[in-house]
Image: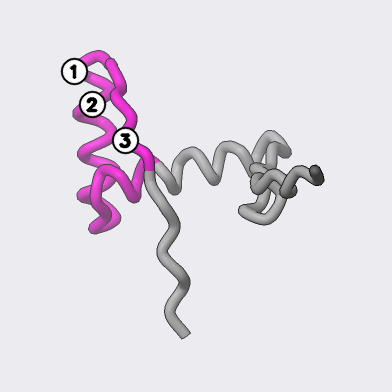
């Protein structure tokens, strides 16, 4: 069953040419897009240091009662 598509947000990054080249080489080595490689790196690092993002359900704010 395909995963549901999540909303994305555009982000701008500034980095040295060396880091950009390393990022591109890592992505190519794994046949990934730059975006996908960045997401994989962030998720792997977060897991390594024990950080977890809120789930989509946790991010939604409950409706206010009147």
Q: Residue furthest front?
A: 66
Chain part drawn in magenta: 9-38
Residue visible at 53% across and 45% down in the picture: 43
Mark 1, residues whose alpha carbon is within 10 Å: few (<14), some, or many (≥20)?
A: few
Q: Is residue 47 left or right of residue 36?
A: right
Place residue 35 in its image quadrant.
Answer: top left
**Residue 20 bears which disc, if any?**
2
In three-dimensional space, the C-alpha distance between marks 2 and 1, rounded to whole angstroms, equals: 5 Å
In three-dimensional space, the C-alpha distance between marks 2 and 3, rounded to whole angstroms, equals: 18 Å
Q: How many marks?
A: 3
Say above or below: 1 vs 33. Answer: below
Give the mark, 1 or 3, whose residue is nearer the N terminus: 3
Mark 3, residues whose alpha carbon is within 10 Å: few (<14), some, or many (≥20)?
A: few
Give the mark, 2 or 3, whose residue is nearer the N terminus: 3
User: Which is nearer the eye, 14 or 27?
Assistant: 14
Place residue 19 in its image quadrant.
Answer: top left
Nearer mark to the viewer, of 2 and 3: 3
Nearer mark to the viewer, of 1 and 3: 3
**Residue 17 bears which disc, if any?**
1
**Residue 10 bears which disc, if any?**
3
User: Which is nearer the eye, 45 or 53?
Assistant: 53
Residue visible at 76% across and 43% down in the picture: 64
Residue visible at 23% across and 26% down in the picture: 20
**Whether label 2 touches label 1, CB < 8 Å:** yes
Q: Main secondary structure of the magenta part?
A: helix
Say above or below: 56 vs 18. Answer: below
- Label 1 sits on a secondary structure element that is helix
Measured as percent of width and height from the top left, residue 37 is found at 34, 46
């Amino acid at each position: 069953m395909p995963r549901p598509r999540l909303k994305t947000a555009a982000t701008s990054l500034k980095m040295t040419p060396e880091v950009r080249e390393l990022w591109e080489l890592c992505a190519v080595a794994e046949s990934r897009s730059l975006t996908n490689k960045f997401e994989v790196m962030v998720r792997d690092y977060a897991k390594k240091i024990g950080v977890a993002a809120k789930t989509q359900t946790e991010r939604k704010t409950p409706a206010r009662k009147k």
